[in-house]
Image: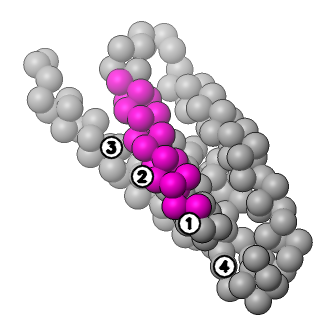
Amino acid sequence: MNADTASSVRIYSPGQVGVACLLGTPLAACCIMALTYGALHLPQKAKRCLIYGVAATTVVIASGFVLPDSVPGPAVAIGYTVAVYQIARQVQGSAVATHRASGGKIGSWGFVVGVGFLGLGVVFAIIAGISFLLPQ
């Protein structure tokens, strides 16, 4: 990626992925990671990342229904956020560093927060739907 291309392409840092995850589950984080893969012209990795995000969020939602009330929800959220952040750091960290070193810019924090809240809304709607369908 040359300097002109790097300056026009926006990718997202592992920290931004972590914030999206904390706000909107792994689904939001993987959407942000997929955008970075897309900007890096790695469409197969972007698609795989989205599949992993759906799978991980499904596990998070399902665990919320089966874990005992004594398990603190915020601890679970912090746990999967740290895991997703570390994964983002490992698989995209060097690409982000190279991008920034060649004059590239990091995507908007506002966009990241928006994706996080959108992910939260999607997950809330899914949980509300499941709760409505389950017998009391």
Could you tell me if the residues under marks 4 and 1 are in contact, i.e. CB atoms within 8 Å? no
The numbered mark, 3 or 2, whose residue comes first in the sequence reads 2
Residue labelled with disc 4: 9
Label 3 and label 2: CA atoms lie apart by 8 Å
Residue 74 in percent (x, y) is at 56, 30
Residue labelled with disc 1: 38
Badge 1 element: helix
Label 4 and label 1: CA atoms lie apart by 10 Å
At x 35%, y 43%, the residue is 123
In which quadrant of the rendered view does residue 106 lie?
A: bottom right
Taking the image as drawn, is residue 130 in sight?
Answer: yes
What's under tag 2, amino acid-wise?
Gly
Q: Quadrant of the C terminus?
A: top left
Residue labelled with disc 3: 124
Q: Nearer the viewer, mark 3 or mark 2?
A: 2
What's under tag 3, amino acid-wise?
Phe
Q: Nearer the viewer, mark 4 or mark 3?
A: 4
The numbered mark, 4 or 3, whose residue comes first in the sequence reads 4
Q: Which residues are magenta?
A: 42-62
Residue labelled with disc 2: 119
